[in-house]
């Protein structure tokens, strides 16, 4: 009887091996051309290319594995334009400096539950703020009900923990005092909103620049969530038109944040009826008392580092704004901000990156570690991972 059970077990294992070996699959080779270890970096695979390589691949049955392993990795289908057709397949890759890693994409019959979410975004009612976060940091932009007091600046929430906290902090802050209210402006062990924005650009808000004045569009009028994890969160914000000379210009801004990154990718499209001219855009970092300012002309970035607010125990915060050197024009400053100025073409995406890093969660200990992170980010942009899809 024991021999019979062992025989059946061997047959079952062999059947499983044959099934895995014969299922339609693609081998993804990822080459790291940089001198940095790229661990846990989100990679984007072209969905159409994948479906041509893997027979029968669909959003509900795609799985990714490290080569030689059978534990599926967390992944995400990304539909950039919400037309119901996937555009990209996302997962986290580990590739050491100058090395190559391989992953296998398979058409599985059953997609296992992926309960692990590393990012999150939501329109928080009744304020209508758009708030978003990952395992390192959180941000928000204020909603229409607050238009009388704020503008289009980006707020920073400092997180001590990798867990998702946005819903919890909002819920606790909204409780009545006699029911255990906890203000998210105070650190209760998970971090807090120490950052002050007001009507400024905050941490990387943008404005049209007419060489003298920052023309801010007020708070957004409409928000549309594009993707909500588990690896990438993305939202599109539409602003009311502003007058610039003879033109009425509308901005649609898409903000995207991946797991493991302190920087958001922002794509702003400025449009004016009947015009394809260029305009100047300012991205700003609000000044804070006692901060150190640094900039890099060649790589087109500005940074501030110092105490997050006037309470030293709340730690230190770095903020950064950067753009493509091809779009960069100059650095400026006004009473409220340090500014980086770039040139945008109407009706085409103007791409830049903004973010923050806090000492309270251990990722950054001082100004040097923050600047080192910025420099590494530039290298990753200059030398992206090389991805090859084959059988």
Image: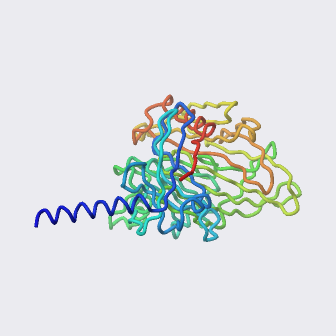
Quarter containing the N terminus: bottom left
Residue 79 in picture, x, y percent from top left: 59, 64
Identify the residue at image location x=73%, y=64%.
Answer: 240
Q: Which of the pair 215/11 is nearer the observer?
A: 11
Identify the residue at the far top of this view: 368
Identify the residue at image location x=69%, y=30%.
Answer: 298
Quadrant of residue 177 in the image? Answer: bottom left
Residue 98 in picture, x, y percent from top left: 52, 32
Q: Is residue 61 left or right of residue 202?
A: left
Looking at the rendered structure, the number of numbered marks drawn on it comes to 0
Q: Is residue 180 left or right of residue 262?
A: left
Residue 217 in picture, x, y percent from top left: 71, 57
Q: Is residue 183 left or right of residue 329?
A: left
Q: Which of the pair 222/299 is nearer the observer?
A: 299
Residue 384, above or below 85:
above
Residue 301 in picture, x, y percent from top left: 65, 36
Quadrant of residue 4 in the image? Answer: bottom left
Residue 371, above or below 52:
above
Residue 265, above or below 357:
below
Identify the residue at image location x=83%, y=55%.
Answer: 244
Quadrant of residue 333 in the image? Answer: top right
Identify the residue at the far left of this view: 1
Give the colour scheme shown: rainbow
């Amino acid at each position: 009887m024991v021999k019979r059970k062992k025989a059946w077990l061997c047959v079952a294992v062999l059947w499983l091996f044959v099934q895995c070996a014969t299922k339609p699959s693609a081998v993804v080779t990822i080459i790291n051309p940089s001198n940095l270890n790229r661990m846990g970096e989100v990679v984007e695979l072209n969905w159409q290319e994948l479906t041509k390589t893997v027979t029968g691949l669909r959003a509900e049955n795609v799985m990714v594995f490290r080569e030689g392993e059978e534990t599926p990795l967390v992944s995400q289908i990304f539909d950039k334009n919400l037309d119901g057709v996937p555009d990209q397949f996302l997962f986290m890759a580990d590739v050491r400096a100058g090395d190559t890693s391989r992953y296998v994409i398979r058409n599985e019959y059953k997609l296992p539950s992926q309960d692990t979410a590393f990012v999150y975004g939501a329109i928080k009612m009744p304020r209508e703020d758009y708030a978003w976060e990952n395992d390192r940091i959180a941000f928000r932009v204020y909603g229409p009900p607050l238009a009388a007091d704020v503008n289009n600046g980006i707020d920073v929430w400092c997180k001590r923990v990798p867990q998702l906290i946005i819903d919890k902090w909002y819920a606790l802050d909204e409780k009545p005092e006699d029911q255990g209210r906890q203000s998210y402006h105070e650190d209760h062990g998970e971090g807090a909103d120490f950052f002050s924005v007001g009507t400024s650009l905050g941490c990387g808000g943008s404005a049209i620049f007419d060489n003298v004045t920052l023309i801010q569009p007020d708070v957004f009028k409409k928000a549309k969530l594009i993707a909500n994890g588990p690896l990438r969160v993305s939202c599109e914000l539409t602003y009311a038109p502003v007058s610039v000379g003879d033109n009425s210009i509308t901005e649609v801004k898409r903000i995207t944040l991946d797991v493991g990154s302190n920087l958001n990718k922002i794509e702003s499209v400025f449009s004016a009826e009947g015009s394809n001219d260029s305009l100047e855009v300012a991205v700003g970092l609000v000044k804070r008392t006692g901060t150190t300012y640094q900039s890099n002309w060649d790589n087109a970035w500005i940074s501030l580092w110092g105490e997050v607010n006037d309470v030293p125990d709340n730690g230190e915060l770095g903020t950064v704004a950067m753009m493509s050197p091809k779009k960069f024009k100059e650095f400026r400053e006004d009473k409220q901000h340090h500014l980086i100025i770039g040139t945008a073409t109407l009706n085409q995406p103007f791409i830049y990156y903004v973010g923050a890093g806090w000492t309270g969660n251990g990722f950054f200990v001082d100004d040097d570690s923050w600047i080192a992170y910025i420099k590494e980010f530039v290298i990753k942009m200059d030398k992206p991972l090389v991805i090859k899809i084959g059988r």
